[in-house]
Image: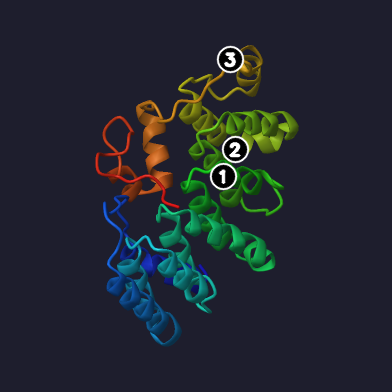
Amino acid sequence: MTAFSITTLALSGLLCVQDTRPDTPPDPARVTRTCEALKESLTKGTPEEAVAALHEAKDILHPDVIASIDKYGLRHKDLSVRTKAIEALGRMGHDNALKALHKLDKRDKKLLRDEPVLYATLLREIARHGSESSIDILTRDLFGVRDKNVTRTRILGLGKIRSKKSVDELIQLMRSTRAGRANDHFADFRLSLVALTGVDKGENSEYWINWYGDQKRSLKIAPRMAPLPKTLDRRWKQFWDESEARGRNKDGERKKGDRKKRK
């Protein structure tokens, strides 16, 4: 295990983020204090202090806070801190947070390809926002990075974006991927397709492709995911982590009080 992986695991418990949003805009003074704390901790503090500052900032949905995480966190020399900055932005329901993640994907392509753990985290947190604007990023060069977790994240990330286009792309990927590679990830294709459609055609690409051919014109994706079968539900929640599960009720719907993404 690399030093990066060890540090990431050691810090992973410090950024357990709930998926609730405040009902009122943050106090301007608090925004200023948070931005100052982020700058201080992320430029001069230890990795533990940097992660603690990100933990404090994660619930303050303000463009200035997001800009500070982008400027000081996404460019931090310690990759474990970058990881936590990515995770914080992934859970901040604000358009600016998603834009910052998209920019990171474009800006640091070489680094991301050399660091598959970091890359998979970025793809997951981009997908967590559930925006159609991320589909092209998730489907671009599916097997370009020879890391199963990166490929898996692309496939399951599509399942998080509740759009017919996600289904279209998943079916197209199944059709265009040679059998051996597709079979390695068919459990992931199935999980995403069930999460999006509420239909389960098992782990057989032919069944899914035939079903899609019959349903393509009339297919509609519900705004919320229907309850998954128990085994699939467990895998889904494990991938999207426990904090994601705590932000939803037993039917997979967001709990009352959760806020929609802000602009």
Residue highlighted by disc 1: 152
Q: Residue 27 — which label? A: none
Residue situated in front as seen by the camera: 133 or 138: 133
Residue to which mark 2 is pinned: 185
In the rendered image, which quarter is residue 113 located in?
bottom right
Compute the Cα span from label 3 to label 2: 27 Å
Amino acid type, residue under disc 1 in the picture: Arg
Name the residue type under label 2: His
Figure quadrant of residue 59:
bottom left
Q: Position of residue 244 (x, y in %)?
A: 35, 46
Q: Residue placed at 31% from the left, 78% from the top? A: 33
Disc 3 target residue: 218
Q: Is residue 15 left or right of residue 84?
A: left
Q: Nearer the viewer, mark 1 or mark 3?
A: 3
When the figure is inspected, residue 238 is found, relative to residue 37, above or below; the finding is above
Front one among 213 and 35 = 35
